[in-house]
Structures are given as structure tokens and as C-alpha cells.
Image (cartoon, grey):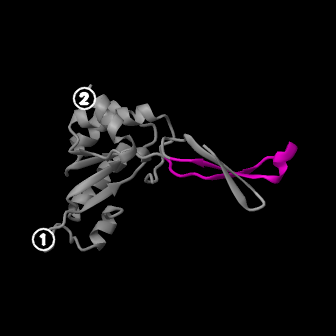
């Protein structure tokens, strides 16, 4: 999948030219405003993308009702809406009280938007897991 | 593994936005396998 309209052009889609390969190309659209996304969507079409992946998580001050309507209305290509969470954010912390001063903690935050799913502690290079 | 993104809020508004996109006429929506089952259950009920 191309990562931007310009990358899409780099993988062989000329500006509106005919592609020999039947593979469809989807290009992600990331911007902090709907207006900027509209410009990028037009660019994606001009370089020959078949589909735009609209990354809702990149929008600042996202208003679902009005923004999604506007994006669908202004998209010159079929749309794929994606709304991705921050992902896999291991946090290394150490506790400096009681016996915990010898442990290093790894708090694994995965997937569901910041939910802590696992806490691991290491002492003498051995990991212990607390689910 | 989840794909990296920038959203850091609650899960319900995130899935509600995708559901809204579907209702408003999006051609495709991207739902992670981990939440697909609950997403479709709530969408159909």
C-alpha cells in the first residue's frame, strides 16, 4: 500500500496514465484538517490511485458528523475509513520504594486505546508477568 | 498486533465514528480483527 499520493506516483502510477498492472492501489490520506485531506485526495486521484484510506486519527478537532460527511462528499475516489489507536506502547518504569526498588517494570499498553493489558517485572534479569 | 495510529481516546467513540462512516456511505471501513466481533454484533443489534 502506498503511504502517500507522492509515494503512489513513485510505484508506477503516472499522472492519470494507464497502468499495465491490474492491482488496485490504495493510498493513505493523513492530515490535521479536512481541507488538507481534500487536497491530498485530489492529488491521489491525479496520480492514479484507485482508493483513498482516510486516516481519521490524524485529524485534529475531529467532528465525526460533519467531517465524515464532508470527506465522503469531496472524495473523488472510493473511500476506506480507518481510525487507528496508539499502539503497543511499552513503558519502562522503576519503583523506588520498599522491595520494589530492585525491580524494573514493563507496563504493556496495547490496542484498545491506552488500555493496560499486562505488567511485567524484572529482577535479576528474570521476567515475571502479572495479567 | 495493532496498526500504529494517533487516536488516544476511549474505544466507544472510535468505533461509533467508524459505524457513522458506514452509515454515511463510506465504501469501506477498517475494523481491527480484535474488535470485529463486538463491532458487528453492536452494528446489527
Give the SS element for disc 2.
Answer: helix
The residue positioned 21% from the left and 72% from the top of the image is A14
User: Dot 2, crowdedness within 10 Å: few (<14), some or many (≥20)?
Assistant: few
Q: Residues within 10 Å of mark 1 (few under 14, many from 20)?
A: few
Residue under the point 23% across and 63% down: A25
Which residue is painted at 31% across and 47% down in the image?
Answer: B30
Visible residue check, residue A67: no
Depth check: give the residue in front, A62 or B30: B30
Residue A55 locus on image (x, y percent): 37, 48
Q: Position of residue A11 (x, y in %)?
A: 28, 73
Camera-nearest residue between A74 and A98 = A98
Image position, residue B20 (x, y; %): 29, 33
Query: Which quadrant is home to the C terminus of chain B?
Result: top left
Asked if A96 appears above or below A5 in the picture, the reply is: above
Task: Say which residue label 1 marks.
Answer: A18
Q: Is residue B33 left or right of residue A93?
A: left
Against B13, is A29 above or below?
A: below
Q: Which residue is mark 2?
A: B44
Q: Quadrant of residue A3?
A: bottom left
Q: Nearer the viewer, residue A72 or B38?
A: B38
Q: Is residue A118 above or below residue A12?
A: above
Provide the residue span drawn in magenta. A86-110
Q: Residue at x 34, y 62 (%)?
A: A4
Q: Nearer the viewer, mark 2 or mark 1?
A: 2
Q: Is residue B34 covered in magenta?
A: no
Which element type, helix, strand or loop, lies under badge 1? loop
Vertical placement of residue B39 versus B32, above or below: above
Q: Which mark is residue A101?
A: none
Q: Is residue A19 left or right of residue B29?
A: left
Q: Give the letter of the chain under mark 2.
A: B
Residue, far right: A98
Picture quarter with the N terminus of chain B? bottom left
Amino acid at each position: 500500500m502506498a503511504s502517500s499520493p507522492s509515494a503512489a506516483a513513485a510505484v508506477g502510477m503516472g499522472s492519470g496514465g494507464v497502468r499495465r498492472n491490474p492491482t488496485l492501489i490504495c493510498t493513505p490520506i493523513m492530515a490535521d484538517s479536512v481541507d488538507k485531506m481534500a487536497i491530498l485526495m485530489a492529488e491521489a486521484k491525479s496520480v492514479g490511485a484507485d482508493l483513498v484510506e482516510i486516516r481519521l486519527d490524524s485529524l485534529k478537532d475531529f467532528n465525526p458528523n460533519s467531517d465524515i460527511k464532508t470527506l465522503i462528499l469531496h472524495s473523488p475516489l472510493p473511500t476506506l475509513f480507518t481510525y487507528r489507536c496508539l499502539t503497543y506502547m511499552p513503558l519502562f518504569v522503576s519503583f523506588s520504594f520498599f522491595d520494589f526498588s530492585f525491580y524494573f517494570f514493563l507496563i504493556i499498553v496495547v490496542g484498545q486505546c491506552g488500555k493496560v493489558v499486562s505488567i511485567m517485572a524484572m529482577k535479576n534479569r528474570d521476567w515475571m508477568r502479572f495479567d | 498486533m495493532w496498526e500504529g495510529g494517533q487516536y488516544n481516546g476511549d474505544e466507544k467513540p472510535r468505533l461509533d465514528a467508524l459505524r457513522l462512516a458506514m452509515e454515511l456511505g463510506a465504501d469501506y471501513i477498517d475494523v481491527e480483527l480484535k474488535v470485529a466481533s463486538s463491532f458487528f454484533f453492536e452494528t446489527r443489534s
